[in-house]
Amino acid sequence: MRDPEEFNDWYVEIVEKAGLADKRYPIKGMNVWTGYGWKAMRNIDNFIREEFDGTGHQEVCFPLLIPETEFKKEADHIKGFGAEVYWVTHAGENELDVRLLLRPTSETAMYPIFSLWVRSHADLPLKTYQIVNVFRYETKQTRAFIRMREIHFFEAHTCHVDFEDAERQIRENLEIMERLAKKLCLPYVLCKRPDWDKFAGAFYTIGIDSLMPTGRTLQMGSIHQYKENFSGPYDITYEDADGEHRHVHQTTFGMSERILGALISIHADDKGIVLPPDIAPIQVVIIPILSKKDKDKTIQYCDDLSRVLKSIGVRAHMDDRELRPGNKFFDWELKGVPLRIEVGPKDMEAGVITTARRDSGEKGQITKDRVASGVQDLLADIQESLYRKVKDEMFKHIHRVSDLAGVKEGINSMSWCGVEDCGHEIEDVTEMAILGVPTSAEETEGGCIVCGAPTKQVIYVAKTY
């Protein structure tokens, strides 16, 4: 595990040097997405869209501003977010009759309209999502992608006829997350949060947490079961087959740009970041090794190679800058490009290309006649190897402990009776947070780690960001 302060300094530096974001915008916590960083985020967004389009969700886009009157309808929600919102009080020089706020999340923007969209059981399930920016006045130290005040945000909102149908949606969301994690090469644990840490207004919350190199966990997203907690205040009802009017049951699934922050943090080494091929803006960089005699021929050869790779869907780039090859290697390793191809006069003469993997540094050669299939095979292997490596690493740091003095860096698994007082004592003594009960069917025989009461329930406990 890395020292948190050293890692934080490294993280800030690497985001800047890799050209992922620019923090010099004159509002703290509102960074500029650079072309390279935005392309990586858009690749992630595209995977999210594919998943939710494929499961019958409709992409929508709701306004940024929410009237205070709508925001206040759900008491727990206003209590949970009230201190974090940005208020709009004037239009020009005119004071507004009803204050507006920038959405911190979109329940209070969407649900008044859901009450108009849903009339009959034939309208259900209603499955929507949007990818937008949300705004929260973060008082802690901001850090690119991980803790921001303007947040690139995905949120799915659904309405259902009953609790069981909403539960089916949550199971579908968990399956979607499993598929996304493979694309992102991000290992995670799923934990049902304790009641004092669930989302404001939720019946229960499942947190999606990944383990950072510092031994702390980062929540990348969450899934919420609302039951009727929002449909009551916002009067979202439907007429069932018997003519009875009932409140819908609702769920949400939220993820943010923290996914990119986690990805950068987990896949890294002393040379810079390491991007999984599925996410990387540039999957293959081609470096001509030039000599005065064969310069034009080599550049043409590399350009042709780039065209071949692009024709099969590989995001390839030829670097023909007037720099030494070593400088180019350094730049692209820093940016995490998964695969480097080197082509010099000897390679052309032999009818091969030289490859270098970013994940392992391993070098090899591919014959010219199988460049397309060879590169695709290498990228697939890099993707699989990255995921397997970080997943194994995370599970190595899940520790089973039997007393509070034995907690370690990483994720600690322990028995808990479920009583809130015992939960708070666990957090106070360990100076860690309860992530919750893992959704996997993990059980124990024994007593609560605090009071000794018999229990089969296991919880995960860790330091968090």
Image (cartoon, rainbow, N blue to C red):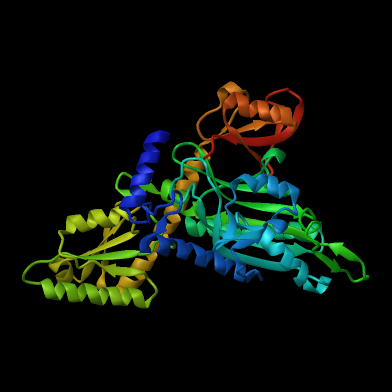
In this view, the residue in front, 270 or 159, is 159
Judge left or right: residue 268 versus residue 414: left
Residue 178 appears at what percent x and percent y? 58, 56
At horizontal 73% and vertical 22% (from top left) the residue drawn is 451
At horizontal 34% and vertical 55% (from top left) the residue drawn is 336
Judge left or right: residue 143 versus residue 86: left
Question: On screen, 231 above or below 136?
Answer: below
Q: Residue furthest left?
A: 293
Can residue 2 be seen?
no
Residue 114 location, quadrant? bottom right
Can residue 224 be seen?
yes
Judge left or right: residue 353 versus residue 167: left
At horizontal 24% and vertical 53% (from top left) the residue drawn is 330
In this view, the residue in front, 390 or 262, is 262
Question: On screen, 23 above or below 117?
Answer: above
Residue 290 location, quadrant? bottom left
Residue 318 appears at what percent x and percent y? 25, 69
Judge left or right: residue 288 versus residue 201: left
Question: On screen, 454 above or below 14?
Answer: above
Residue 276 location, quadrant? bottom left
At horizontal 44% and vertical 40% (from top left) the residue drawn is 213
Residue 375 appears at what percent x and percent y? 34, 67
In this view, the residue in front, 32 or 456, is 32
